[in-house]
Amino acid sequence: MAHPSLFLASRAASLLDPASDAVVAGVLGRAWCALDRPRRAAVRANRTALSARFPLERPFVRYVTSLLGWLRLLGLTRADVQARTAIDGLAPLVAASEEGRGTVLVAAHVGEWEWGAAALAAAGLPVVAVAGVQMRADWNPALRRAKERLGIEVVGPDASPVRLARALRKGAVVALLVDGDVVTATAPAAVAGRSVALPLGPARLAARFGARLVAGRCRRDPADPGRYVVTLTPLDEAPGDAGDEARLHARVAAWLGTVLAAGPGDWCLFRPFFPAPRTDA
């Protein structure tokens, strides 16, 4: 049984016409931004690091929009998700699954990442999502059950590499957020012209176990806010990439940099991502 507050939130989202999400998210997101000084400061720091210009409330509004879709998702079936989603670039993941290689899928806090994972599961691929506590600790058990019903197995960031390797050999998609803050290993990488400690897990898993390395984004269809479009981009097709952890890590960083350059205000990250500028004593 779902946690009462999660059930009510999901029920409210399901009763809301997706066409109204932009208006609701606009109101709630602006209020959240105004009231949440620490997260507002983090967004400002990231905006400065990217040399970007966008209203500070924009990531808050974008997050509420994705949250409404996520809450609505909890009441849907796999068939519902499949009927409402178009996927571009699925063939390499299907081939990797059939070959017993599996796919390491990298995503970022941009767009509707929760819906994207559900869409891959609805397409018939086993999905293992690596994630920490989501939203609220008391929601976690219900969220895990809901995702299992949609075909998504959730494991913690401390999951054994052996467990993940076993899932890949069974043809699974192992999904990781490359801008997450709960990681076991990082390595320096260039993102948007800045050196950051980027999670090494995606490149390491793909290099060590021969899995495909693919990046994924999920966005609302501009013509119909109740439908979604998933775009999958292979990151391992350049000569010499296969098995080379350092090269694959650089590919992940380059993809993230491209995504952020295309829409810095869509990045729903509420902690400083880039190192603070050094000041000489």
Image (tube, helix red, strand yellow):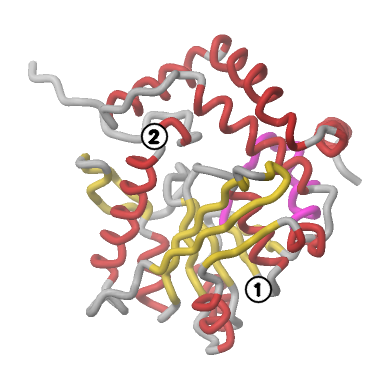
Can you identify the residue that label 1 sits on? 125
Seen in the picture, residue 156 relative to 225 is either above or below; the reply is: below
The outermost residue toward the left is: 281
Image coordinates for residue 1, horizontal then vertical, percent? 91, 46
Residue drawn at point x = 54 percent, y = 43 percent: 111
Residue drawn at point x = 51 percent, y = 19 percent: 57
Amino acid, disc 1: Leu
Report how far apart the C-alphas of labels 1 and 2 lie in the structure: 31 Å
Q: Is 140 placed left or right of 183 in the picture?
A: right
The part of the image, by quadrant, that contains residue 155 is bottom right
Q: Secondary structure at mark 2?
A: helix
Seen in the picture, residue 40 relative to 129 is either above or below; the reply is: above
Say which label, 1 or 2, has the lower sequence index: 1
The part of the image, by quadrant, that contains residue 72 is top right
Residue 26 visible in the picture: yes
Q: Is 275 placed left or right of 175 in the picture?
A: left
Segment colored magenta? 130-147
> Which of the two residues, 260 or 137, is positioned nearer the viewer here?
260
Seen in the picture, residue 54 relative to 73 is either above or below; the reply is: above
Badge 1 crowding class, 10 Å Cα cut-off, few under 14, some 14 to 19, many 20 or more, is many
Image quarter (top left, top right, bottom left or bottom right) of the C terminus? top left
Can you identify the residue that label 2 sits on? 264
Image coordinates for residue 122, horizontal then vertical, percent? 72, 66
